[in-house]
Amino acid sequence: MIADKFGTLRFFDFLSDCTVRTALLWLAATLITPHVLAADEPALTAEPVPEPVEASAPPVAATLTPIPAPASIPASAPQASAPPAITPVPTPAPLQPNQAVTGDAAGRALLNALLPGNIPDRAGWSTDIFTAFSTLKIPYSPSYFCASIAVIAQESSFQSDPVVPGLNEIVWKEIDKRIHKFGIPRLVVQAAFAKSSPDGRSYNERIDALRTERQMNALFEDMITELPFGPKLFADDNPIRTGGPMQVGVDFAKGHVQVWPYPYKIQRSLRDEVFTRRGSVYFGTAHLLQYPTSYPEMIYRFADYNAGRYASRSAAMQLALAKITGQKLTPDGYLMSYNGAVPTNTVTDSQRALFSLSGKLGLSRQQMLADIRQERYAAFEKTATYTRVFTLADKTAGKPMPRAALPQIRLISPKITRKLTTAWFAQRVDGRYQDCLGRLDNAR
């Protein structure tokens, strides 16, 4: 280095006294070994020397981080990994007709999936039906929901206050029949009917304007309490025995409230509640479902709904008795004779056939009579009379006899204008029941 050669900076003073070119030539001559130019070699032209800079430590070489070699693959491991397996989401199993769901939320969802979509006030119907089920402690199953839905559809087509075609004519015929029966002068009846009734209209006007069962029920209630011959004409009893969208019996409602709490506040009377949507749905559902059976199919409950609880079981027993004795018995579902819901002492053909088997069954007449008085209760199936009759019937037929049969009963009511039977009713309701179960796919 130049600074090291001279050991002092006086060299720069010397440079100031000489021309730059002369100093450079001198420096070149002093430091550089002379070079003899070849004949054809050009002369060197000196370039300015840059100002020296302070020496610095040599740069440190950059340290490279080596890229790690890929880990060795064990010999036993696959060379290429397979794509992860996709676990399919399982499809929920279809809900079975007798399979109940748990919880009110699930029950409401199931009911809403099963209700027809085009009914008026669908939300109101759903509320009344669900209230009946939850209060009566009936399981939330498709079969039970559809049973109630089917009866409502058959009896009223989901009309809260069903319209009865020709209802005014039906009532006039009923009144004429009763006038003749009790010998009340027609002129007296006509004069009374021309007077104003509690709603401001004459009875004649109200009868002519009748369209629904609830209007008819209110009319009869007023005639019984307001007209002087009312109690006699209607025997202190309203002839309209069933009402509302489920056509439930008034007598059944009166008995039911004695053993199970009614969930609503009674506004006017219990009879009037039967003709409301909420009351009819509640009592109708109780009559249809709130009792145990061993029936193989729901159609027999529909028959019972029309003919009385366990009528299908009693009809099957009548067929068994006919098989054993060879007697011709009508399977109407009544082993006993009844006055309303009360058994009478009248001996029926079914009882005579049963009593004739006293020796074969090893039972006294008194024992058999005591047993068949329980035909409207679940406990009848555990009686000696029931079990021994079917044991003998199965042996006689060479195969098991049916334990349920559709009762053969002709339906009679002031509101029925054509020939109908209990079997017809049960079959019609069962068709609607099957349609309802067809909506089960919506409940998944």
Image (cartoon, rainbow, N blue to C red):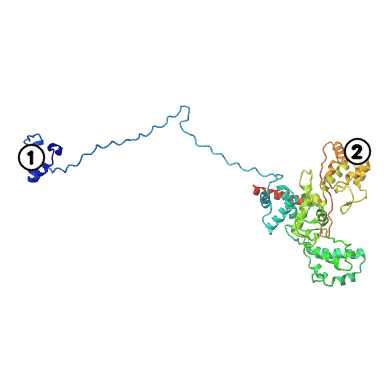
User: Number of numbered discs present?
Assistant: 2
Q: Identify the secondary structure beneath mark 1.
A: helix
- The circle drawn on residue 358 is none
Q: Residues within 10 Å of mark 2 (few under 14, many from 20)?
A: some
Viewer-closest of 290 and 189: 290
Residue 71 image point, x, y percent: 42, 31
Residue name at image x 70 percent, y 55 percent? 127
Mark positioned earlier in the residue sequence (2 or 1): 1
| Label 2 to label 1: alpha-carbon separation | 155 Å
Residue 338 image point, x, y percent: 89, 52
Instruction: Give the residue at mark 2.
Output: 361
Where on the picture, by quarter, is residue 389? top right
Where on the picture, by quarter, is residue 232? bottom right
Viewer-closest of 175 and 293: 293
Q: Identify the secondary structure beneath mark 2.
A: helix
Residue 122 image point, x, y percent: 68, 57
Dot 2 and dot 1 residues touching (CB under 8 Å): no
